């Protein structure tokens, strides 16, 4: 099932047009699309949105803060957009509950098809990011228009969603078997796909990073720009404040770290539903001087945080293949994290980082302390990261596309 594309034996794509179905046009989905647009004559992207989230612009409700990540001005980032790409929102009104979410696939197809007609979009290939609901819409578009269909399974849509119930298993198997090619970001995800009844060839390609944004910068200048202390060891974690990101275990680990050294500050960069809960945990453990929640930051500011730190930490409970890991390595920084998803497939040597089990604050504290004491070869980390640039990943994606014509 783990099929590798042949190289240099297929036609060029520069006369073809591609249609991308996305959950959002920002971060890793955006960079994957942008990196492959150069191979096509013309590209279009349809981005799913929910008008309910726009209400939060006008009525701020603290326990609905998670809706910020679903607003159009967050989901669609039109900076640095390729000249041959057009991006259109496809709004779908639905309540964020399971019964509504199960119906989202057909609704997504309906609004995508409407947008295709309204904007007179022409396409020779459909590529959906995430199996649900973009994948279902892509499968239906293949049936209607008779074009090749590619789906990328990123994380929870592969390792969690198909195994929630028989109904979900059937929905995701339909999408995967409708595809002409499946891309997934880790062999861990591939193992999950192999538990399903899926016949479509699967290609394992990791996420990547933009080498023009994430590169080595002067640490002191980055700290000064961000107003961070120059005389401390700085730990940075970047991620939405969600349970699966494991921040509570990082805070618990920091309580142990400061028992051994007090010259450290951990900055958790990101916003989300658990912000109030994590603030209370920090206060209750007396870590106000050692753990700081910065809130969400623009993606363009994240390279400064990466370069300002001594070590980067990601305490996730599960992952597909986290983009921030590649961005961290691209900045020449060591990665401290958990053995989940595709992480151990990338951090294959202690020259690049240190790993522990998830939900293990004692083990995480031990790795943090070891990483702070270790003399890292930043040039070696940077050199290793070069294979994970989006430009390199895009070459492999383009070969998969070519094999479908």
Image (tube, grey):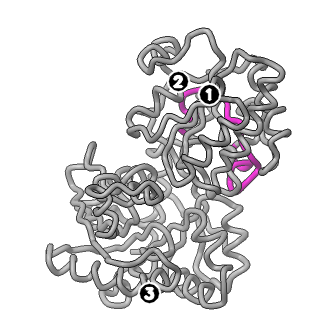
Q: Which residue is mark 1?
A: 333
Q: CA distance from mark 1 to mark 2?
A: 7 Å
Dot 1 crowding, Cα within 10 Å, few <14, some 14–19, many 20+: many
State which quarter of the image contains the C terminus: bottom left
Name above or below for residue 288 compared with residue 359: above
Residue appearing at x 54%, y 36% in the figure: 293
Q: Nearer the viewer, residue 99 or 44?
A: 99
Q: Secondary structure at mark 3?
A: loop
Q: Which residue is mark 2?
A: 307
Q: Which residues are magenta?
A: 327-346
Residue appearing at x 55%, y 67% in the figure: 153
Q: Secondary structure at mark 1?
A: loop
Q: Secondary structure at mark 2?
A: helix
User: Is mark 1 in CB contact (under 8 Å) with mark 2?
Assistant: yes
Q: CA distance from mark 2 to mark 3?
A: 43 Å
Classify residue 257 by image quadrant: top right
């Amino acid at each position: 099932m783990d099929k590798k594309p042949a190289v240099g034996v297929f036609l060029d794509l520069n006369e073809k047009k591609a249609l991308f179905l996305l959950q959002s046009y920002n971060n890793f989905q955006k960079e994957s699309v942008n990196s492959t647009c150069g191979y096509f004559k013309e590209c279009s992207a349809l981005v799913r949105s929910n008008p309910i989230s726009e209400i939060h612009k006008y009525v701020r409700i603290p326990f609905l803060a998670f809706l910020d990540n679903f607003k159009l001005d967050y989901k669609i980032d039109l900076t640095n957009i390729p000249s041959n790409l057009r991006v259109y929102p496809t709004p779908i009104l639905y309540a964020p509950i399971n019964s509504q979410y199960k119906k989202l696939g057909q609704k997504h197809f309906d609004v995508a098809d409407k947008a295709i007609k309204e904007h007179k979009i022409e396409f020779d290939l459909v590529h959906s990011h995430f199996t649900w609901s973009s994948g279902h819409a892509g499968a239906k578009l293949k049936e209607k228009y008779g074009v090749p269909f590619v789906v990328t399974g990123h994380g929870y849509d592969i390792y969690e969603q198909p195994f929630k119930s028989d109904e979900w298993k059937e929905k995701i198997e339909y999408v995967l078997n409708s595809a002409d090619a499946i891309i997934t970001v880790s062999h861990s995800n591939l193992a999950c796909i192999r538990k399903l009844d899926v016949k479509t060839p699967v290609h394992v390609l990791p996420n990547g990073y933009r080498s023009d944004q994430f590169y080595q910068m002067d640490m002191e200048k980055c700290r000064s720009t961000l107003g961070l202390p120059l005389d401390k060891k700085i730990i940075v974690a970047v991620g939405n404040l969600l349970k699966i990101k494991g921040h509570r275990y990082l805070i618990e680990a920091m309580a142990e770290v400061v028992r051994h050294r007090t010259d450290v500050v951990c900055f958790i960069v990101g916003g989300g539903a658990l912000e109030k809960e994590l603030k209370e945990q920090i206060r209750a453990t007396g870590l106000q001087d050692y753990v700081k929640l910065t809130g969400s930051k623009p993606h363009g500011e994240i390279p400064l945080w990466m370069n300002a730190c001594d070590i980067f930490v990601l305490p996730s409970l599960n992952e597909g293949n986290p983009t921030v890991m590649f961005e961290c390595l691209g900045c020449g920084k060591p990665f401290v994290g958990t053995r989940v998803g595709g992480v151990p497939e990338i951090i294959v040597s202690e020259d690049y980082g240190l790993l522990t089990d998830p939900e293990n604050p004692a083990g995480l504290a031990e790795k943090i302390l070891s990483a702070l004491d270790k003399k890292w070869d930043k040039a070696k980390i940077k050199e290793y990261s070069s294979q994970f640039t989006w430009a390199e990943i895009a070459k492999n994606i383009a070969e998969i596309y070519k094999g479908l014509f």
